[in-house]
């Protein structure tokens, strides 16, 4: 039978479990004693046919880019998907070489007048036998497929609706205009040239290259991070390559910078290179399989948690956009910065600290106190933001002597949102893309009623705006012509980090967050923040059925909420607040937290913990283990939790 006949026979055998929260993900390669294949070229054909039908049934002809990584299953999936799309009337362009996800995302934004849908075939950081589809599609304001809309992630119920469309055969079988498939070969090269050009322009005042003599070990893990090499070299970065040959089975280590064995080789290489003291030590960057996520190893060989990088990125955004924040404060408006339930509480403290300083500034100006005096007072307290990121009454008499006691007590007690506010949103790149688009569009609306100078300040905020997940996905408007559409690109995020380090004297050192004369290095930068002990992101086995997995998390949520209202001794510290936008995060009165959530991409429960001491960290983990034990009969494991707890005893 040919592919079309096999697809028709397979239609009612499609596995609904491959339609996840924000992508399609399944097992695509047979391995000994491994899972059964549930994502083949036949499945890809049916998915492509259903996706194109969303447009062709409305009389629209979608123009679709299909790119892929280099896994063994990717070529067949790419072919099946392209043929399915064309069968329903789509015009399809297939990239001829393995493509990083960031390049695919950039390409559809850059070519938005020529493309309506982009599909990246990738298993990301997962084992080589996994694979999947990340879909970006033009949609209108109601989230409906529409070639006149903006490129947005297709996810959630709209993604899952493809399954029902397939099994119910709601497809375009005989399109008025036949579809076709063509091959293009310029996606990666155009992306590389554009990234180098953009950052050369950004660095123009510094001669088009970084001022710091950066020396980087680049560990691609045999994945698509290798496509960053010519960009870094073009900008003057000295490099040593590790595992930069494309190998779709990832034979040397997992292409996952969030796992210890995914970064071990880079850590050891950095330690070896820096045995001899040097004024310009080496550091490392590690990429995941499709290059949309990156990790960083400092000059001491220590891994830097992505959530800590986010603290640095948000701090720089706030420092660089103080004028924009003042404008928003005057308008009684704010810019929202996304928070990840897995992230450190330090980022919340920094945002709240900065917002409350804006509130003090607002109070002073209302009472006609000199703006120069105000800025001096704010600057003196701002310098404490990383080391003491909680405003206390002791800070006020020395720096803000004219504030009545009742006023500063109000500022300390209330949740004030002057200019900036943090907001927890569910994990997953589509949720971040949707949230940041709302924030960028909000700034655009506000600009219409402002002076030219004020518009320029908000435009700068739009261009520098960022968001991130604790897993290492950082979101940027990589296409200057469409700043409201942000994408996760691990290559771009490392370029941003290097530029941040290159300009430390103009911001973090200038504002006193780092001592004058500090050498701009990763270890000095991250060593300037008072971090708290934090666990690894722990993943333990859970039921494979999504409904059962999420039901368990729902039960845990109700147990924690009941414990907050009427404590029974399950937790040694009282629960201060509960965040349940994605799983459940219990925040305790001592500043520690415990999180459990269901993974959207695998049969796992994910855990994260933070505390004020390592002893307290072990205690919080043990409390979660006891909470999970009643669910072991339903397939919940606590093995990884117990191993993590042992690290702190």
Image (spheres, grey):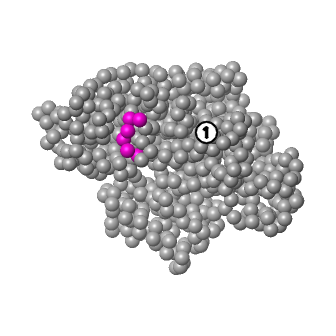
Residue 325 place in picture, x, y as percent: 70, 46
Residue positioned 51% across, 38% down in the render? 485
Q: Main secondary structure of the magenta part?
A: loop
In the picture, residue 467 is in which quadrant? top right
Is residue 183 visible to the viewer in this orientation of the structure?
yes
Q: How many marks?
A: 1
Quadrant in which the N terminus is drawn: top left
Quadrant in which the C terminus is drawn: bottom right
Left or right: where 286 falls relative to 38:
right
Residue positioned 57% across, 62% down in the render? 593
Residue positioned 34% across, 44% down in the render? 24
Residue 32 place in picture, x, y as percent: 25, 43
Q: Which residues are magenta?
A: 143-148
In the picture, residue 442 is in which quadrant? top right
The relative height of residue 572 versus residue 71 in the rendered view (above or below) is below
Q: What crowding class fits label 1: few (fewer than 14 Cα within 10 Å), some (14-19), or many (20 or more)?
A: many
The relative height of residue 614 versus residue 101 in the rendered view (above or below) is below
Left or right: where 30 falls relative to 336:
left
Is residue 131 visible to the viewer in this orientation of the structure?
no
Residue 577 place in picture, x, y as percent: 58, 67
- Residue, disc 1: 462
The relative height of residue 192 versus residue 157 in the rendered view (above or below) is above
- On whether residue 502 falls in the magenta region, the answer is no
- On whether residue 144 falls in the magenta region, the answer is yes
Left or right: where 449 falls relative to 565:
right
Residue positioned 77% across, 50% down in the render? 382
């Amino acid at each position: 039978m040919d592919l079309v006949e096999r697809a028709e026979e397979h239609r009612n055998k499609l596995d609904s479990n491959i339609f996840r929260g924000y992508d399609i993900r399944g097992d695509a390669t047979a391995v000994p004693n491994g899972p059964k294949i549930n994502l083949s070229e036949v499945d890809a054909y049916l998915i492509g046919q259903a996706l194109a039908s969303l447009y062709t049934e409305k009389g629209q002809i979608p123009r679709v880019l299909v790119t892929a990584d280099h896994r063994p299953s990717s070529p067949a999936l790419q072919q099946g998907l392209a043929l399915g799309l064309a069968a329903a009337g789509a015009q399809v362009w297939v990239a001829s070489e393995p493509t990083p996800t960031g390049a695919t995302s950039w390409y559809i934004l850059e070519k938005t007048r020529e493309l309506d849908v982009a599909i990246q075939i990738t298993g990301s950081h997962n084992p080589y036998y996994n694979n999947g589809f990340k879909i970006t599609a033009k949609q209108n304001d109601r989230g409906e497929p529409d070639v006149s809309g903006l490129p947005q992630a297709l996810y959630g119920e709209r993604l899952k609706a493809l399954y029902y469309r397939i099994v119910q055969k709601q497809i375009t079988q005989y399109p008025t205009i036949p579809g076709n498939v063509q091959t293009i070969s310029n996606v990666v090269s155009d992306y590389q040239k554009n990234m180098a050009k953009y950052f050369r322009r950004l660095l123009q005042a510094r001669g088009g290259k970084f001022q710091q003599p950066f020396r980087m070990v680049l560990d691609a893990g045999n994945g698509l991070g290798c496509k960053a090499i010519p960009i870094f070299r073009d900008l003057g970065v000295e490099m040593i390559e590790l595992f930069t040959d494309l190998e779709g089975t990832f034979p040397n280590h997992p292409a996952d910078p969030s796992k210890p064995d995914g970064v071990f080789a880079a850590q050891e290489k950095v330690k070896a290179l820096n045995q001899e003291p040097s004024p310009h030590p080496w550091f490392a960057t590690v990429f995941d399989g499709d290059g949309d996520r990156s990790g960083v190893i400092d000059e001491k060989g220590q891994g830097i948690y992505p959530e800590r990088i986010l603290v640095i990125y948000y701090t720089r955004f706030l420092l660089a956009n103080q004028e924009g924040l003042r404008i928003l404060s005057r308008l009684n408006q704010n810019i929202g910065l996304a928070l990840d339930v897995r992230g450190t509480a330090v980022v919340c403290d920094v945002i709240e600290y900065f917002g409350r300083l804006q509130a003090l500034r607002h109070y002073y100006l209302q009472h006609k106190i000199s703006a120069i005096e105000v800025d001096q007072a704010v600057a003196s307290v701002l310098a404490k933001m990383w080391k003491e990121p909680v405003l206390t009454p002791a800070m006020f008499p020395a720096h803000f002597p004219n504030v009545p006691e009742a006023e500063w007590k109000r500022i300390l007690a209330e949740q004030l949102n002057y200019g900036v506010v943090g907001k927890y949103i569910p994990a997953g790149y589509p949720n971040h893309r949707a949230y940041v688009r709302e924030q960028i569009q909000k700034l655009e609306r506000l600009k219409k009623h402002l002076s030219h100078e004020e518009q320029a300040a908000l435009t700068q905020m739009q261009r520098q705006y960022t968001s991130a997940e604790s897993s290492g996905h950082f979101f940027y408007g990589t296409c200057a012509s469409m700043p409201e559409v942000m994408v996760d690109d691990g290559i771009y995020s490392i370029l941003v980090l290097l530029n941040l380090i290159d300009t430390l004297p103009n911001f973090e050192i200038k504002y006193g967050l780092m001592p004058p004369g500090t050498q701009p290095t990763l270890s000095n930068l991250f060593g300037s923040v008072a971090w708290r002990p934090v666990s690894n992101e722990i993943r333990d086995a859970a039921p494979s059925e999504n409904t059962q997995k999420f039901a368990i998390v729902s039960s845990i949520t109700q147990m924690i909420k009941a414990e907050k209202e009427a404590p029974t001794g399950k937790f040694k510290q009282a629960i201060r607040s509960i965040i349940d936008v994605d799983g459940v995060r219990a925040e305790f009165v001592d500043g520690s937290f415990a999180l459990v959530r269901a993974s959207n991409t695998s049969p796992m429960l994910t855990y994260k913990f933070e505390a004020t001491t390592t002893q307290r960290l072990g205690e919080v983990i043990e409390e979660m283990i006891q909470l999970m034990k009643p669910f072991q009969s339903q397939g919940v494991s606590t093995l990884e939790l117990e191993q993590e707890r042992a690290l702190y005893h």
